[in-house]
Image (cartoon, coloured by chain):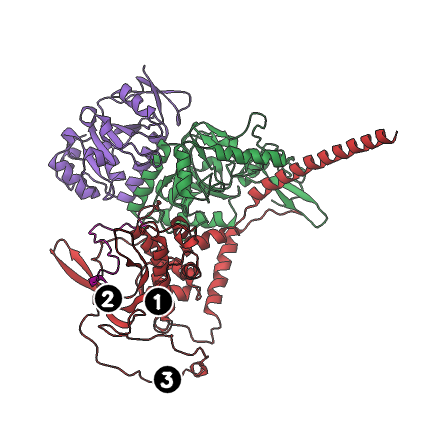
Amino acid sequence: MYVAVKGGERAIENAHAWLAEERRGDTAVAELSIAQIREQLALAVNRVMAEGSLYDPDLAALAIKQARGDLIEAIFLIRAYRTTLPRFGATRPVATGEMACDRRISATFKDAPGGQVLGPTFDYTHRLLDFKLAAEGEVAKAPTAAPRNEPTPHITAFLRGEDIIQREPDSEATPGDLTRTPMSYPAGRDIRLQSLARGDEGFLLGLAYSTQRGYARNHAFVGELRIGTVAVEMEIPELGFTIEIGEVELTECETVNQFAGSKTEPPQFTRGYGLVFGQTERKAIAMALVDRALRWRELGEDDLGAAAQDEEFVLSHSDNIQATGFLEHIKLPHYVDFQSELELVRKLRREAEANVAKQNAGNEDAGKEASQ
Amino acid sequence: MNVSENRAAHGAFGGGFADPAIESAFAFRTAMSVMAKPGEIRALDTAHPPAPLSSAAGTLLLTLCDPETGVFLAGACDTPEMRGWLAFHTGAPVVGADRAEFAVGRWADLVPLDHYRIGTPEYPDRSATLIVEVDTLEAAGATLRGPGIKDSATLSLPDPAAMAGNAMLFPLGLDFFLTCGGRIAALPRSTQISEG
Amino acid sequence: MSDYNFAYLDEQTKRMIRRAILKGLAVPGYQVPFASREMPMPYGWGTGGVQVSAATLTPEDTFKVIDQGSDDTTNAVSIRKFFEKTAGVAVTEETEKASVIQTRHRIPEAPLREDQILVYQVPIPEPLRFLEPRETETRKMHSLEEYGLMHVKLYEDISQHGAIATAYAYPVKVADRYVMDPSPIPKFDNPKLEMAAIQLFGAGREQRIYAVPPYTKVVSLDFEDYPFEATKADHACDLCAAEDSYLDEVILDDAGNRMFVCSDTDYCRTRREAGHVGRLGEEVAA
């Protein structure tokens, strides 16, 4: 006997209750605190802040806990929260040249003012599982050095002095904001960079990698990669001056790319740029490579038809919250559409079978005639 | 407008919405209904802007305008009081006709229509909406046909010929709200207009 | 839920959506770009419809949500609860009593009235998208009213299958100007697109809002020799005996037995309450 499907509401409530239980896991195991996630899963927290477009380590840690460690789900929680926040104003552009660097490396110069500072990097760790960590070993204190007090100038600034690298136009214009105005193409570089900065790390990594393998290759050197904290300042019109409202950790990557030139312009290096919240250097490098690939038109390069050069393709597919929502929505009921298609296919099959039958009958008749 | 309301409208701070989320929700429904059904006349009188603006026009401004929308105050509407009221309640910048998202005033002060943005072929929505203050608003006068209208409707229009000319630009063109005291009607660019 | 504003969205966002709705009504069938916000439900699950509803609802509304024609599908339940909580609106399952109806994939069977609003959830608002993936190109095609590609596609269907092979999201032309995607409703519903109610379409992920005012001319694309046909399963509802409603096919057992029931659960219930009984109406638990 058929019973109409009912009880969607109860099913949802029960599913939520079960989910909450699964999230907690075995209650004999101590519950994770937000501080533990913030301090010990900091790179996950950074990714959630970067792609969630909200700098708040505690909220990102909470989102990771709530999402059971699913970072895209955590990013989604942060985005949905962020969109409800009132907007008080815009800050001054951050001065990354004055960053207090934890890490600063250049692949283009052996040394430069400010030095090469490896910082807390995985780079030269041998990827061997450290079984001591399984036993909650205490960590030895890392050696320290006296902090540098003078600013660490950008590597590209030295090249600019020689005029051997492309100059970026200065502008006081307010950059666009894709969270406040609908995307339209062609997008300006401001919107492109914003989109990349909050785009999915995996998607950008794949695209950047494709440029290295020859799909719009642009010969990138990491001119500089720096990670550290910068002051965030805001002009308060009522006060008539600028005040510091806090600081954020950023990763900045500037690539120095193949040179371009013409009869009238001497050859110059070009650049790609990546700037991301937190210590997120894979993302920042990928962003710089994709940014550079997207600049083909302004630099007078050829459109090689590569994915990374295709602004509309890159920008409309880089957002993992859009992508995962649409991907996963196909598990929602679609039986009304399917029924319509089912009827259509049945009808087309009936007609096709009737045609075949008619044709066979015709052939039989023709056969009979021939044999007679 | 009665005396006490008139008093409330004085200065930049009075005459706004007491409960913006709820009052603008109701006001929008009215605006949407008249825009969807050209010829329909409905009451809209929540806000009380400074003179000479009507309650309907003021309510509409509070419902639709904010710092992202430029407003052109035409002719007699452009008073320091009105600027203050608009700034305080909406934060909308006052701009020239050519940059306006919304323009408000009497027909004679709003024309000529070719000052306003009519959208582009690829983005016909990037066009101005004119809020026209009229002395009479009734279901009489020009005959309207088109989307939103079952068969035909009639509506008193300040300048049927100019408005018919605007409709010729479809899908580009301007969209109009007609406001009269505490009442409102609308005329989108999609409406075909014939006299009498 | 006092932590959030009425109907969840902040006022500035609602104003932005409301302005887009008004432009959409003024240019029927044209897709107005809007700065869609991240909602607390996933993109592709009705965020466009939810934003349009949030900008449209007043506390006096009675709200109905259907998915696949039914009020009790999980996503419909979830959206209905969201607005019950955030907007405090009354909710109903009765089409007749609803002032705002949000829908995914169906138009109710009962004719809607002038004082009702139908809000559609739209996944891909661009009817030309599957012929030309680029927004920059499709926008140009709309601006030039260049819809030849669509006709070519439909015609290729005919030469390959002997019929237009589009069963849902069947493209329409609105007010003799814009080709529009009516959202993935079965083509059976297309004739109902000319109705007395205001129709609003919201695509959140794709950031588009469009609208069809009451009584607007909406024509399903076709050819003189292959006219549009609104089709459904060739059965009556096994519960209420309706012959004019769109039917879901339900597999009853592994012996190939099927039953057909109204997709519009409220329509079916109303008919059964009025005494109509279908083939299996007696033996089925309500």
Sequence-earlier tag: 1 or 3: 3
In the figure, the shade used to draw chain C is green
Residue annotated with mark 2: A154
Q: Chief secondary structure of the magenta span?
A: loop
Would residue A96 be seen by someone viewing this image from the given angle?
no
Q: Is residue A211 left or right of residue B167?
A: right
Give the letter of the purple chain: B
Q: Is residue A163 magenta?
A: yes
Where residue C38 sits in the image (x, y, percent)?
37, 52
Instruction: Look at 27% across and 53% down and name the residue there.
Output: A86
Residue annotated with mark 1: A281
The residue closer to the viewer here, A231 or A252, is: A252
Three-letter amino acid code of the residue under disc 3: Glu
Q: Are marks 2 and 1 in contact (CB under 8 Å)?
A: no
| A235 to C273, vertically: above or below | below
Residue annotated with mark 3: A138
